[in-house]
Image: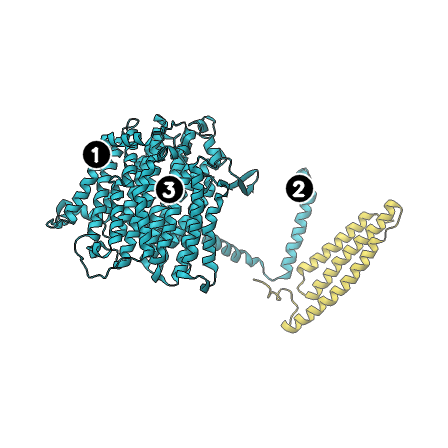
Amino acid sequence: MLEWAWLIPVFPFLAFILIGLLPKRTLGWENGAGYAIAGAGGALVLSMLVIWDVLNGHILTADAPRSTWLIIGDYHIRFGIWIDQLTAVMLVVISVVGTLVVVYSGGYMHEEGVGRRRYYAEIMLFISVMYGLVLADNYLEMFIFWELVGLCSYLLIGFWYEKPSAASAAKRAFIVTRVGDIMFMAGLVILLWRVKSLDFAVLFQHADPPGTIIQQGLISQNMLTLATILIFGGAIGKSAQFPLHEWLPDAMEGPTTVSALIHAATMVKAGVYLTARTYPLLVQTPESLLFVAVIGGTTALIAATCALAANDIKRVLAYSTISQLGYMILGLGAGGYLVIHAHSGGGYAAAMFHLMNHGFFKALLFLCAGSVIHAVGTNDMRSMGGLRKHMPITSITMLIGSLAIAGMPPLSGFWSKDEVLAGVYEGGQFDPIFFVLWALGIATAFLTAFYMFRMWFMTFAGEPRTAYHAHESPKIMSVPLMILAGLAVVSGFALFIGDGFKSFVEGSISGLGIGTAGEGAIEIARTVFTNPLTYVTLGLAVAGILLAYRIYFMPGFDRSVFARGVPGTIQRALENRWYISKFYDDFAYKVWYGFSLVADKFDIYVIDGIVNGFAYLGANTGSTIRRAQSGNVQRYTGFVVLGIILLLVFVIYVFPWGGW
Amino acid sequence: MIPIEYWLVFSSLLLAIGAYGVLTRKNAIVVLMSIEVMLNAANINLVAFSSYHTTLHGSADASGQVFALFSIAIAAAEVAVGLAILLSVYRRYQTIDVDKINILRW
């Protein structure tokens, strides 16, 4: 079965071709939604078969069938598929969320008219290349799909391209992620230059046991550190990590379904996936791991604080996405230390567990937000309120999502967030900085609970703040919400099924010399509930929810304190996203524009000066020596005679003297 | 048999005289005549070397004489063309002084 996994991206790709090329009247329901659902569904079924195989212990890695794409000299570039437990986790998220989002789009995009054709075609292309990205068996193939998902992201953010803010958000997303992509490519160039291969099979085989790739003299320690940090740079861009995170909130200009699928559940996970996939290299470079962890921890906290003051419902979710991605990256960074020092894949597995759970509950939250926006017609939470009565299904599913992301047991977010934070704390034994990062992590957990419930209370609770005519969304939208809500509840229990989710995922890095714990469900539960840190996190999350309840639900709280004095300053800093966006704008407008002006002047006066100088020299020389052309035939003849005489002198006297 | 050197000195003098005429005379017709003198210097060289070949190898080689004949024919054609050009120059400018005919300058 696994050999046929390459067919997974083919289904959505066929749908993309069909939707794009078929005559308009054959598109049918919703301008192509039928084809889109069929394409996504086909991939879903096939993915499930593949996942079933992986669950049964089959993987297809180094010995997968491959086809040659390019031959350059004696260097063959081959493409193939790579399916291990990590791929399976990604497949679960992409296939389930992808299919549900496409179904949901059938209702959500109803009013878009002919634009729906473009929408469905682009969504199908995105799903197809996203599958390609996780199935790739070498960095080059991955990089190609990596760029393609970036392209789809650009196209879909700019779906309403006639709106200037959407068009510029699309450009911004494209350019900012490109900064990361260039770093990724530079890292690949280093690997290709030194190790002469980008195949996972080659790169990772040298990585077992850790350190051999360096011991074999293929690459120096410093060079490998540089390469892994650069590759992680790609993840910083794509997964919107600090300092390249500002594109993601702007990306909310796209349709909400796009935000749910691309900017919450799948594409932004590509950076986390890349980091996880690079693990065999990362564990050889502890400095890179530390960098990864610090970036993750910083991002988690900064994004969570930005979410506190956002009034756009989608921006709150966007910042929470960045924050949760920071958790995953932090978990991966700490997990690497555990692999090196404790021979345990716990942190790694916890991060991937959080990735899966987050994929479900964040898609759910976005689709709920879409449902709300669909009903109210605005993104601004200040004009909502009291929607609970009008939209019972949406409000309950969103409550489930909010509880899950806040980390309330027994919902999925509790288990994975707890595992990630436990992994980070454990890393503190090997480098004290992880204790600091752990503190950032629990602070983020508190903030997460607070802003999620601020959002929920502002949207659904209380009384309507404007006169809107909301109604519950149609079945085609509410059923995917219910399915995702169900998944958000149960996906956390994957921790306990069989040998447990963690030992399953650890299988994909089993070559790194880790001892799989293989704990039973009871032991896992006991570990979770006897750890005092669990209750610290849980207590903070509950405190966050209660605080939000106090400020945004209970009457009698004077919120004007946020407008004055020190709280006011902080409030304004948060509303301006810590001025990071402003810093980039200033940097572009002032520093870079100034530099450009200098470059312009240099071009005009120096470069053009040199070019014009040569032209002037030529013209002047010409006008001087053209006076030799007197038009006098006899003078010409005189020159000819003189030339002949000189030639004779040369031939007879000068050349023989020189030895000719 | 006159030695080859005599012929060469003679033709060199003839060439120099012709060249002197081409370079110094103002009248275009005289310039044309001087060119003919130079051509004939070349013809003399051709015939002289043809004859010298017989002296050197004991066998005749007529190529030099044939080239001389070609050269004379071409010189005749050239004179015809040259005189025709001079005629139209004279009609246009009322002069055939080569110093005055300088419209092809810069």
Q: Earlier in the sequence, mark 3 or mark 2?
A: 3
Q: Quick check: can you spot residue B44?
A: yes
Secondary structure state at the residue bearing disc 3: helix
Q: Quick check: can you spot residue A145?
A: no
Q: Are marks 1 and 3 in contact (CB under 8 Å)?
A: no
Asked if badges 3 and 2 are on one and the same chain, I answer yes
Q: Earlier in the sequence, mark 2 or mark 1?
A: 1
Q: Which residue is mark 1?
A: A536
Q: How many marks?
A: 3
- Please name the color used to draw chain B: yellow
Q: Are marks 3 and 2 in contact (CB under 8 Å)?
A: no
Name the foreground residue: A599 vs A573.
Answer: A573
Q: Which residue is mark 2?
A: A654
Q: Position of residue A290 (x, y in %)?
A: 33, 32
Q: Position of residue A525 (x, y in %)?
A: 28, 32
Tell me the CA gap for discs 1 and 3: 29 Å
Secondary structure state at the residue bearing disc 1: helix
Q: Is residue A36 left or right of residue A479?
A: right
Numbered tag placed on residue A271 in the rendering? 3
Q: Residues within 10 Å of mark 3 (few under 14, many from 20)?
A: many
Q: Quadrant of the C terminus of chain B?
A: bottom right
Q: Quadrant of residue A412?
A: top left
Chain that is coloured cyan in the picture = A
Q: Is residue A213 left or right of residue B38?
A: left
Tell me the CA gap for discs 3 and 2: 76 Å
Q: Residues within 10 Å of mark 1 (few under 14, many from 20)?
A: few
Chain of the residue where label 2 is placed in the rendered structure:
A
Asked if badges 2 and 1 are on one and the same chain, I answer yes
Residue that extends furthest to the right in the rendered view of this protein: B58
- Seen in the picture, residue A87 relative to B106 is either above or below; the reply is above
Q: Nearer the viewer, mark 3 or mark 2?
A: 3
